[in-house]
Image (cartoon, coloured by chain):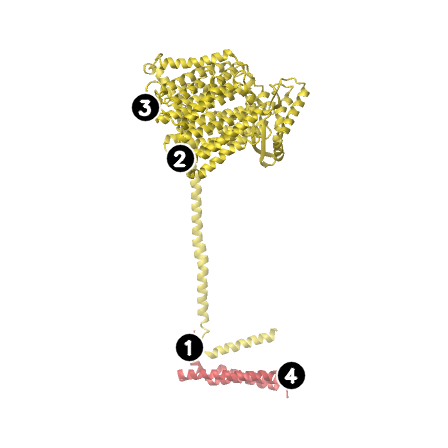
Amino acid sequence: MYLNQFLFLAAFLFCVGVYGVLARKNGVLVLMSVELILNAVNINLVAFGAFHGTVTGQVFALFVIAIAAAEVGVGLAIVLLIYRNRRSIDLTEADLLKG
Amino acid sequence: MLRNAWIIPALPVASFFVILFFGKRLPRKGHEVGLAAVGLAFVLSLVAAGQWIDRPATLLVEHGVTEHGAEAEDHGAEPAGGTDDHGAEPAGAADDHGTEPEQEEHEATLTAAAAVEEEKAEHEAEHIRAPVEREVTWYENGPITIRAGTHMDGLAVVLVVVVSLISLLVHVFSTNYMHDDRRYTHFFAALSLFTAGMLIMVTASNTLQLLFGWEMMGVCSFMLIGHWWEEKNNSDAALKAFFTTRTGDIGLLVGISILFFGAGQTFNIEALNSAALAGDISRGVLVAGAAALLCAVIGKSAQFPLHTWLPDAMAGPTPVSALIHAATMVVAGVYLVARLYGVFWSAFDIGDGGINPVALFGGLTILIAAVLAFVQSDIKKVLAYSTVSQLGYMVMALGVGAWTAGVFHLFTHAFFKALLFLGAGSVSHAVHSFDMKKDMGGLRSSMPITFKTFMIGTVALAGIPPLAGFWSKDEILLGAGENGYGLFLVVGLLGAVMTAAYMTRCVYLTFFGSYRGHGHPHESPPAITVPLVVLAVLSVGAGLLNAPGILLFTEWTDNATVLTAGVAHHEFSVSTAFIGSLAGLLGIAAGYAYYWRNLGPHRLTERSAGAKSGYRFLENKYYLDVLYTDKIVGSIKGPIARAAYWVNQHVLDGAVNAAGIVARAAGRFTYEVLDQKVVDGLVNGAGAGAEESGSALRVLQTGRLQQYAAFLFGSVVVLGGALVLFV
């Protein structure tokens, strides 16, 4: 087992997540892409922790998971409210803050 | 008291301030303060006089040692220098001397005695009382030390006594005379300050202090002559008195400055006198200084041609006239000559018997003023011209070398002239007028005390033995005759005849004939008559002080300057006395014949054109006032006014206008450039900048979430790249 295998996987997942965040119009999919980015980071943290033989990485990963859960809760609530108001979750249409 | 003589002038000064600040709240409106202060000053003066008389004669002075006696040149200055030494010491040392007066006398005796031994007593010498001088340092500036102090000798003591006595009597007189005056309190305040000015001047040890007192009197005379300033005439008279004396005062300032530098930077009077007598001051400087001082004397002592202010000064209240004419102000000039006699003696060669300016002005004044006294109808103006004439006597006496006679005449004249003025005040109190021809006449029965005292004053003034005026006038005539001034002897005799005649006229018009006024005149209350009686007694008795065989006055007033100069004391001469009293009697007889017996050329002015024009010439006072106001002042004031107008229009207005223009231009620049462009530009620029940047940046604000995320990601990539690459 080499460290770089995990790093490649994390980088791939991160890129997929970034693509999803920037390109998808569906709000739920954007949130799921954010989850991908966060889990890519978690893989990195756990991998480095294991590589160095400490638990710090795993502890950080646990914190990230907890915060990601809260974030998804809030994010889905926002998406739900947008849907109720507009009957659509297309993020390109939610541009009320246009200057 | 001689060492603490400063207390005497300090009392009226203090009284001035007390009256000024608290007078109106006091039960008697302030006059009690003035009376107390002047009364105390008089008592202290008497104490000082007593101490002076008791003072042992320890200072040895030789007669007639001036710069003319080449052999004794150094020596002549030494006795005076002996007393002067302690004046030049630091103040602390002078104060030490103050506790031991004997010590300084001792020193003076020693130096003088040593000098005499050296010279083997070639000259006639005499012991006199040493003057008491006490000085403190006023301020120091480099090598020049200016001192203030008192110099008490016989002359100063005599003047202090006379001034405080006359002032006291005038205060008493005024409490009644000025009773309902609206500025009663201020009147007494000014009276106090006036007295203080004279006392400061009389006790001064240096010329600066003398100048100080002199000017104080000038200011106070202005206040007092213009006391009833609501009437234009009175304020005009006050201004005239002030400006005329001021004209002369310039001379005093110039003269003091000249002598200060001429005598080696000293203001000390003793030092000036001895320097002048020893010939230490170069001839030209000395003459210039003395001439300048003589101008001051002419102004202040109302000598021809600056005598015109004095009769006008009658506009003031009568007690003021008495004070000005008898004891203060006008005798200041005479005192100045007497005090700085060494300077005048050397500068004008008074001892040589030629015509000199001092005697000349004095002699001219005697005659010119006496003639004018004949044509006055105002009783006070008669007395005013009489004063001018008598001052002429004093100045002439000093001018002909009869120093003691001049000072003695000052002394006796103070009493009978104060008496006459207060008498005139008493008369006017009764008839409410000063006009002899219109409102008086026949007052001898209704005002017996005033009449009797006035008669005594008249006879004293006319110089009838044995009253005061006779002795002093006789001494003047004697001095003029014996010192080789024959011309001035004749002038003096002529003056005596005229004095007696115009006083007879005055008495006739006031007290004899029938009453021409309105109402019922009555005798004045005691506050007025008591001073009259006191003065009458003195007018009778004061002359005996220097009667032949007694000669106390001469002994008391002798000082080093006079003796060193060689002023001669002449033996009483029966023939001069006889001629002098004959002159007085002649005048009285002429007046008696003209008015009582109706003899002589009455109504001459109506018959003869020449006499009429002469009369008019006299009535207009030789047209001197016209000359001064219309010709001299009139011709000067036009150009001065035009010049002042030109300066005003061109220089002052130019400056003001230029300032205005500059201010306007600066204002416009500030508004247009600084305010409008810089400040507003900054403010507007800030606003416009915010607007522009806002409208530029709003393009970025699309409201599209994913675009923001793209910017965020892009920035993180850039920052992360930068982190990897540069750190």
Do tags 1 and 2 sit on the same chain?
Answer: no
Residue B161 rendering spot, x and y as whole percentages: 51, 27
Helix, strand or loop at mark 1: loop
Name the residue carrying label 3: B517
Helix, strand or loop at mark 4: helix
- Answer few, some or many: residues within 10 Å of disc 1's Cα (few below 14, many 20 plus, some between 14 and 19): few
Q: Chain of mark 3?
A: B
- Answer few, some or many: residues within 10 Å of disc 2's Cα (few below 14, many 20 plus, some between 14 and 19): some
Q: According to the colouring, which chain is red? A: A
Q: Amino acid at mark 2?
A: Arg
**Extreme residue in the top direction:** B575
Q: Residue at x 50, y 34 (%)?
A: B11
Residue B338 rendering spot, x and y as whole percentages: 53, 23
Residue B183 image label: 2
Vertical placement of residue B653 versus B597, above or below: below
Q: Amino acid at mark 4?
A: His
Q: According to the colouring, which chain is yellow? A: B
Q: Are marks 3 and 2 in contact (CB under 8 Å)?
A: no
Q: Amino acid at mark 1?
A: Leu
The mark that comes first in sequence, 1 or 4, is: 4
Q: Chain of mark 1?
A: A
Spatial CA span between label 1 and label 4? 48 Å
The mark that comes first in sequence, 3 or 2, is: 2
> Along the line of sight, which residue is nearer the eye, B429 or B334?
B429
Name the residue carrying label 1: A96
* Mark count: 4
Q: Chain of mark 4?
A: A
Spatial CA span between label 2 and label 4? 115 Å
Name the residue carrying label 4: A52
Residue B636: in sight, yes or no?
no
